[in-house]
Image (cartoon, rainbow, N blue to C red):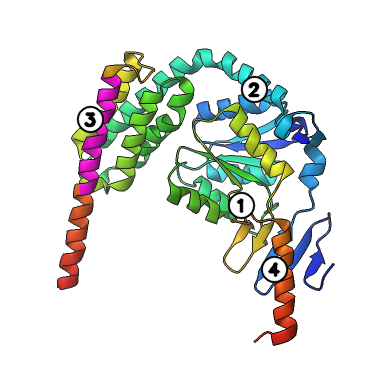
Amino acid sequence: MSEHEASMGDGTVAQDFGDTRVIHMGGSLRAKAAVRSQDAGGVDEMSVAAADAAMKDLSGDFHNWMGDEVNRLIAAFETFRDAPPNSRDIGPLFRAAHDIRGQAGIFGYPIAAEIAGTLSKLLDKIEPDYLPMQLISHHVDSVKAIYRNNIRDYANPVATQIIHNLRKAIDRVVEARQKAMAEEARFRRTM
Amino acid sequence: MFRVDCSRLRFLVIDDNGYMRRIIRTLLHGFGTREVFEAEDGAAGLEGFATHLPDVVITDWSMPVFDGIELTRMIRQPDTSPNPFVPIIMITGYAERNRVFEARDAGVSEMLVKPISAKGLYARIAKVVLNPRPFIRTDHYFGPDRRHLVKADQYKTRGAASSFVTSHLGNA
């Protein structure tokens, strides 16, 4: 052990380099759970297969779960839209969209996930006062339509057209807002 | 070669979405895990962390009140946390580069972008158990080394260089 190293017990060793300390873990977790395996790359194929099978058993519920998430999105949007502008809380609407972005793919609705992803981006990047309500409404309606028409793959021409149109509309809104902010900053600098 | 026997590990899953918790729990049980504790927000997660002392924490990012990033920062408090070294796997819908950096800088060990798969989750668990990164402590950061590809030899080299500088030039 060099002059820069110190034992911290449990096989853990710390090295000091000026104001930086590097701590090499003793491997207690490894000692607890690592077992020798014949599987290439250390992947436990049997465990992964068992988990996949368990997910398949669960997947019978996914359609209903997706319905619950879509209803949550609709309710969050309506609450946001109907609240007085100075007391609107973007949080529940963002989280509902963000959850669909993350989960709809697992539930078998990747197109709804993509639409919810663009909605999340919109809600994240534009200040609540400048959010275009019509565009949010288009997104919510699109997710609802995808779910109710059980559109699950990209080969569906209606789905791809919806995604294309929404993306273009969002890019226009974000670009316009960024330009406005840049103009505002330039104006302030000249004051 | 080694694999991870998940039946020997205790997990804490923190996500405000009940369906997502159910999915993660199903995958973990599929891996053979018996001990899976759950919390539905960061505050409850922090309490569960202190109570159950999990081997691995799996958390969502976006949660009301107290999110996964704040939770990670609390867990990575070296002087107050019950286990600041615990592996933290963040499962999130965020895939943007700046978000990945933000999670890394908070002290997240591994990220997994939704939609998740059994193979993806197992791979992250295997990585934090079998090949954990060293921890770095500075005045401004405590957490896993943010450079993913650092080899043990580089630390030795750096140690040698540091010794050389100190012995030849002093600490000036």
Residue for badge 4? B158
Q: Position of residue A93 (x, y in %)?
A: 34, 36
In this rendering, is residue B135 above or below A20?
A: above
The alpha-carbon separation of the residues under discs 4 and 1 comes to 16 Å
Q: Amino acid at mark 4?
A: Arg
Q: Residue A156 occupies which quadrant of the picture? A: top left
Q: Position of residue A158 (x, y in %)?
A: 26, 18
- Packing grade of label 1 (10 A; few <14, some 14-19, many >=20) is few
> Residue at the spot x=60%, y=69% of the render?
B139
Q: Is residue A139 left or right of residue A16?
A: left
Q: Amino acid at mark 2?
A: Ala
The alpha-carbon separation of the residues under discs 3 and 2 comes to 38 Å
Q: Position of residue A190 (x, y in %)?
A: 15, 72
The alpha-carbon separation of the residues under discs 4 and 2 comes to 42 Å
Point out the stretch of residues depicted in magenta.
Answer: A158-175
Q: Position of residue A57 (x, y in %)?
A: 59, 14
Residue for badge 1? B148
Residue for badge 2? A51
Residue for badge 3? A165
Q: Residue A92 occupies which quadrant of the picture? A: top left
> Residue at the spot x=53%, y=30% of the render?
B116
Contact between labelled residues 4 and 3, with CB atoms less than 8 Å apart: no
As helix, strand or loop, the secondary structure at mark 1 comes to loop
The alpha-carbon separation of the residues under discs 3 and 1 comes to 39 Å
Contact between labelled residues 1 and 3, with CB atoms less than 8 Å apart: no
